[in-house]
Amino acid sequence: MCIFCDKINNGDYFYENEEVVALYDVYPVAKGHCLIISKRHFDNFFLATASEEEAINKAIRAVKKIIDELYKPDGYNIGINIGEVAGQSVMHLHVHLIPRYLNDMDNPKGGVRGVIPEKQKY
């Protein structure tokens, strides 16, 4: 069993809907960094059912409201790593919802393009 399956089975999350749960990232890159995790164990967003995709979108909006109230971020990044080459380290579908704050880095231009740092600048 994987670490995310354990967390789901143990109830270690703060949000739940039909298909997903949400919990705070153990290694956050920002205050309030959350993971939205499928209840069904599979590794690839492209294998999600229409119901799972809908539940992910519903969770993103609901969790954002929670984070907005608690931390009052100035923006967000949403990301999914698919496969080891893309940086996926836990092979269970999860979406990163990362709050962003004014001046949390020198130049945020390029946003998620920063996964390949030398190509972030344009």
Image (spheres, rainbow, N blue to C red):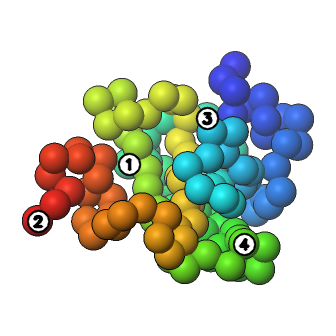
Instruction: Tell me which label, 4 or 1, sits earlier in the chain.
Output: 1
Q: Secondary structure at mark 3?
A: loop
Q: Which residue corresponds to mark 1?
A: 46
The quarter of the picture where the N terminus appears is: top right
The quarter of the picture where the C terminus appears is: bottom left
Q: Which residue corresponds to mark 4?
A: 71
Farthest residue, direction left: 122
Please give the label number shown on residue 122.
Answer: 2
Dot 4, crowdedness within 10 Å: few (<14), some or many (≥20)? few
Dot 2, crowdedness within 10 Å: few (<14), some or many (≥20)? few
Q: Which residue corresponds to mark 3?
A: 41
* Drawn side of residue 10 relative to residue 106, left or right: right
Instruction: Tell me which label, 1 or 2, sits earlier in the chain.
Output: 1
On screen, 8 above or below 23? above
Q: Amino acid at mark 2?
A: Tyr
Q: Amino acid at mark 3?
A: His
Task: Judge by depth and name the residue closer to the eye, 74 or 94.
Answer: 74
What is the C-alpha distance between the residues marked 4 and 2?
30 Å
Q: Are marks 1 and 3 in contact (CB under 8 Å)?
A: no
The answer to whether residue 57 is seen in the rendering is: no
